[in-house]
Image (cartoon, rainbow, N blue to C red):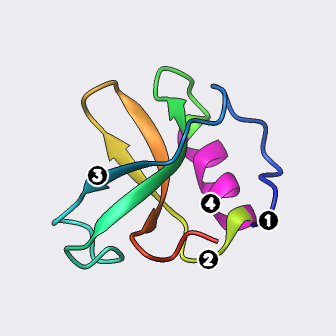
Amino acid sequence: MTTLNAPPATELLPAQNSASSWCPECDGRGCTRLTAFPAGNPRAGLTADEAARAHGNGAHVHYVPRGDQFAVVVPAGEVR
């Protein structure tokens, strides 16, 4: 796994599974959350995008309304 270059606004979370049927990149599969950034930070979306690019392996960003945050996730089965 590539180290995230962007400093997370919160500590790295234990990988958490969730479902995302609306995301075309997850294509209805579950996903594993790698880290999250509070959306109250005006640069949170950009920071999350940078962290996803640094991770690679299909990582991308979901907005999570519950908790108002941007989560960096990978589709289920692609965590390395």
Dot 2 falls on a residue whose secondary structure is: loop
Pointer 2: residues within 10 angstroms few (<14), some, or many (20+)?
A: some
Q: Please state which of residues 76 and 47 is positioned toward the viewer in this rendering.
A: 76
Spot occupied by residue 54 in the image (x, y as percentages of width and height): 75, 63
Q: Is residue 34 left or right of residue 4?
A: left
Residue range highlighted in magenta = 45-54
Pointer 1: residues within 10 angstroms few (<14), some, or many (20+)?
A: few
Q: Is residue 47 above or below residue 76?
A: above
Q: Tell me which residue sits at (83%, 51%) in the image.
A: 5
Spot occupied by residue 59 in the image (x, y as percentages of width and height): 55, 67
Sequence-wise, which precedes: disc 1 or disc 3? 1
Q: Which residue is mark 2?
A: 57
Q: Tell me which residue sits at (68%, 53%) in the image.
A: 51
Q: Please state which of residues 41 and 12 is positioned toward the viewer in this rendering.
A: 12
Q: Quadrant of the C terminus?
A: bottom right
Kind of residue at disc 1: Thr
Kind of residue at disc 2: Asn
Q: Is residue 73 above or below residue 35?
A: below
Q: Main secondary structure of the magenta part?
A: helix
Q: CA distance from mark 1 to mark 2?
A: 9 Å
Q: Which residue is mark 1?
A: 2
Dot 4 falls on a residue whose secondary structure is: helix
Q: Which residue is mark 4?
A: 52
Q: Please state which of residues 30 and 55 is positioned toward the viewer in this rendering.
A: 30
Spot occupied by residue 47 in the image (x, y as percentages of width and height): 66, 44
Whether tag 1 and tag 3 are in contact, CB under 8 A, the answer is no
Q: Tell me which residue sits at (45%, 41%) in the image.
A: 70
Dot 1 falls on a residue whose secondary structure is: loop
Q: Which residue is mark 3?
A: 18
Residue 50 included in the magenta stretch of the image:
yes
Q: Tell me which residue sits at (65%, 36%) in the image.
A: 12
Whether tag 1 and tag 2 are in contact, CB under 8 A, the answer is yes
